[in-house]
Image (cartoon, rainbow, N blue to C red):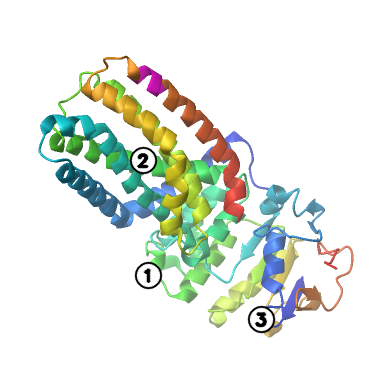
Amino acid sequence: MLAIIGHNGSGKSTLLRIVATALRATRGSGSVWDADLVRDAVAIRGMVALLSTEPGVYGDLTALENLRFSAEMLGVDGDRRRLLAALERVGLGVEGDERARNMSSGMQRRLSIARLLLREPRVLLLDEPFNSLDPDGAALVNTLMRETRDRGGSVLLVAHDVSRAEALPDRTVEMNDGFLVEDVSVGTPVAVVERAP
Amino acid sequence: MSGPPTGNDAAWRRVRAVAWKDLTAERRTKANFNAVVAMAAMILLLFGFALGPDAEGLRNAAAGVLWLTILFSGVLAFNRSYQLELEAGALEQLLLYPGERWTIYVGKLLANLTFVFLMEAIALPLTGVLYHVAFPERWLEVLGVLVLGTVGFVSLGTLYAAMASRSRSREVLLPLLLFPMLVPVLIAASGATAALLVGDVMGDSSTWIRLLAVFDVIFLIGSTWAFPFVIEG
């Protein structure tokens, strides 16, 4: 588990998006479990899951429909009971037929966490995961991080403040102006091995 | 931690999911469909007023007016298609699902085709009434031309809407980018429709139909190939 801290605009979220293949790096190179960030983007998207600062849900769809869509896109079982179980786990069990548009930002955040529960990613990318979440929600994120680590996966956590992360990161590095202030050792699952000059 | 399913079945599952999602969201609100149908009716009426009361003049102009109506109204639908993705950062999540990104394009294409066909189902009889066009003998061919023209129009529209979606002025940008590219489809579709509606004296319609089919193949293949690059921004 790697935590990246840094000021606003230091490049933490950009780095996370590059690792997730949402953005393409203009210089340098990188890999996720030996898959090249540019050449093997499709393979990487099969390995990583990103909890972004925005919930990424469809307001006109219900919570259940949002999850069903995700299950179809991920190619996993979209059985109603399974989706309901995911919603119950994030505390939205009774809001299954509620449109996402009518939910608070915290509930939408929980819905995006429920989406992560539909599969077991090899690398979990979390961008300010504790934003908009109450203590129960924060505990849920912590459980998710622990579960990913316990099954041999990697967690990349980006936050201003990592104190709400109960599972202590194996390594914490600071970013400043697009550069890692502390070095990341070779062999880390998510390795950014070349820096821009 | 197994990887996501791959292959044709998985790809078509994603295509269906994207189309279902877009159509469900639209069915839920109907805001866009109502606006598009109202726009189509308005354009048909205004052109009718501008062309005057001469029945034969209206009949001769019907095909061109119908296709312009489809173009002007349909472009509203394309913007809405990506508006859904821009709310709450859904586009980023959509792009991060595993699998090939052309599946997103094909899903959106199917949803937009359904949408535009529904609009045409209202615009076509309205054109007949307002422009004094009798029910054509070769109505099956007219429908065929509508399908071919719409596929060409929607395949390009879905691609260009993706291109314009990241721009703040996308509502203005989309028609500016799209309409010049649609000139060949507009000419061929109007020519074929006119030949079928007012009489195929010169045997024109088959030439136009073949041309439309060629445009469709080129636009479909080109757009499906280009979409992953365009949507990445």
Could one spot residue B36 in this view of the protein? Answer: yes
Q: Quadrant of residue A133?
A: bottom right
Secondary structure mostly seen in magenta is helix
The residue positioned 30% from the left and 21% from the top of the image is B141
Which residue is the site of mark 2? Answer: B114
Which residue is the site of mark 1? Answer: A102
Position of residue B96 relative to residue B138, above or below, is: below
The chain carrying label 2 is B
Front: mark 1 or 3: 3
User: The residue under label 1 is which amino acid type?
Assistant: Asn
Which residue is the site of mark 3? Answer: A8
Left or right: residue A51 versus residue A67 is right
The residue positioned 44% from the left and 60% from the top of the image is A58
Tell me residue B58's x, y (percent). 17, 34
Q: Magenta stretch: give its range.
A: B205-209
Left or right: residue B29 versus residue A112 is left
> How many marks on residues?
3
User: The residue under label 3 is which amino acid type?
Assistant: Asn
Q: Identify the image quadrant of the C terminus of chain B.
A: bottom right
Task: Give the distance between the C-alpha atoms of the residues marked 1 and 3, in whole angstroms.
Answer: 30 Å
The residue positioned 42% from the left and 58% from the top of the image is B172
* Tag 1 near tag 3, CB within 8 Å: no
